[in-house]
Image (spheres, rainbow, N blue to C red):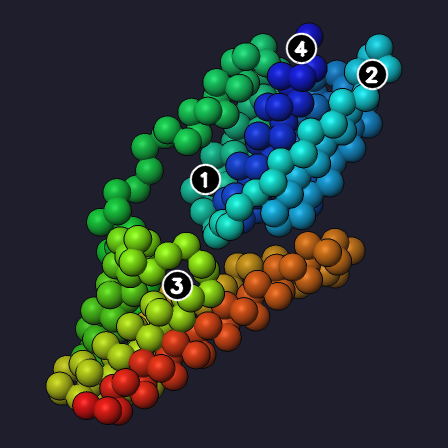
Amino acid sequence: MDYDKLLNAAVELGCRLMSSGAEIYRVEESVRRLLQAYGLESPEVFAIPNCVIVSITTPEGHPVTRMRRIGAHGTDIELLERCNDLCRHLCVQTPPVEEAQARLTELLHTPRYALWKVLFGYGIAPACFAPIFGGGASDALCALLGGLAVGACLLYGGRLIGSNGFFRTAICSAVGSLLSLLLVRLGWGQSVDTVTISVLMVLVPGVALTNAMREIMAGDIISGLSRAAESILTATAIAIGSAVGVAIGGIF
């Protein structure tokens, strides 16, 4: 067996899981189970949100280590589910390593949701939050329009906004709060607070913060603190952006 290819495939799976927002324990356990399924004993796996390191010892006693750095990423539940399903399949069937690598490559080329469907989701989510926060039908409509604006900034404004997560979140938050204020002033909505909070909910890093707390309690301190710091920075960006949006709206 080509253990270099097997190790590359295992690291690739770990990177895909991490990029989709998986918990640290899930990444480490999935990679470890995959290597053990192919006959390797006691593989060592270490993962943090931006790096995966895997070390194995071949039956001949030769140690091999791979490290992959992971760039900025968010949460993709669909990709996470596909990675989990593929990992289970590989562990049970143990196909040739070449086939396993091909299956991993297919994950990137599998048809995903169309951008317009994702944009529609950005609009529907705030519209559903508005009644929860005590808003009426008009507030839900304004939240829908604000969510569509924020989603458009996230999906289509990458070239103008840039890839920096902090500034991207701040700009999207400013756009959402400003539009919410203007729509209420035009008489489309009743409560600017309800509309603004509903729109900003699509930017709140709830999954990341939940994973951070879980990892801290599970003993993955480095990963937990890293995710917690990222969540706090995102929350700060939301606060700054919304304040800027309200300030700009107050000028007019």
Q: Which element carries disc 1, helix, strand or loop?
A: helix
Circle nearer the viewer, 1 or 3? 3
Q: Position of residue 100 (x, y in %)?
A: 54, 18
On residue 118, the disc is: none
Name the outermost residue toward the right.
61
* Mark 1 burial class by Cα count in 10 Å: few <14, some 14-19, many 20+: many
In the displayed structure, 133 sits above or below 126; it is below
- Which one is nearer the viewer's eye here, 70 or 84? 70
Image quarter where the N terminus lies is top right
User: Which mark sits nearer the N-terminus, 3 or 4?
Assistant: 4
Query: Left or right: where does residue 97 sit relative to residue 157?
Result: right
User: Which mark sits nearer the N-terminus, 1 or 4?
Assistant: 4
- Residue that mark 3 sits on: 168
Disc 1 + disc 4, Cβ < 8 Å: no
- Residue that mark 4 sits on: 2
Disc 4 + disc 2, Cβ < 8 Å: no
User: Which mark sits nearer the N-terminus, 4 or 2?
Assistant: 4
User: Which mark sits nearer the N-terminus, 1 or 2?
Assistant: 2
Q: Which element carries disc 4, helix, strand or loop?
A: loop
Circle nearer the viewer, 1 or 4? 4
- Residue that mark 2 sits on: 62
How far apart are the alpha carbons under marks 1 and 2?
A: 34 Å
How far apart are the alpha carbons under marks 1 and 3?
A: 23 Å
Q: Amino acid at mark 3?
A: Arg
Residue at screen point 86% across, 15% down: 61
Q: Which element carries disc 2, helix, strand or loop?
A: loop
| Residue 204 sits in quarter | bottom left
Query: Left or right: where does residue 180 sit relative to residue 204?
Result: left
- Residue that mark 1 sits on: 79
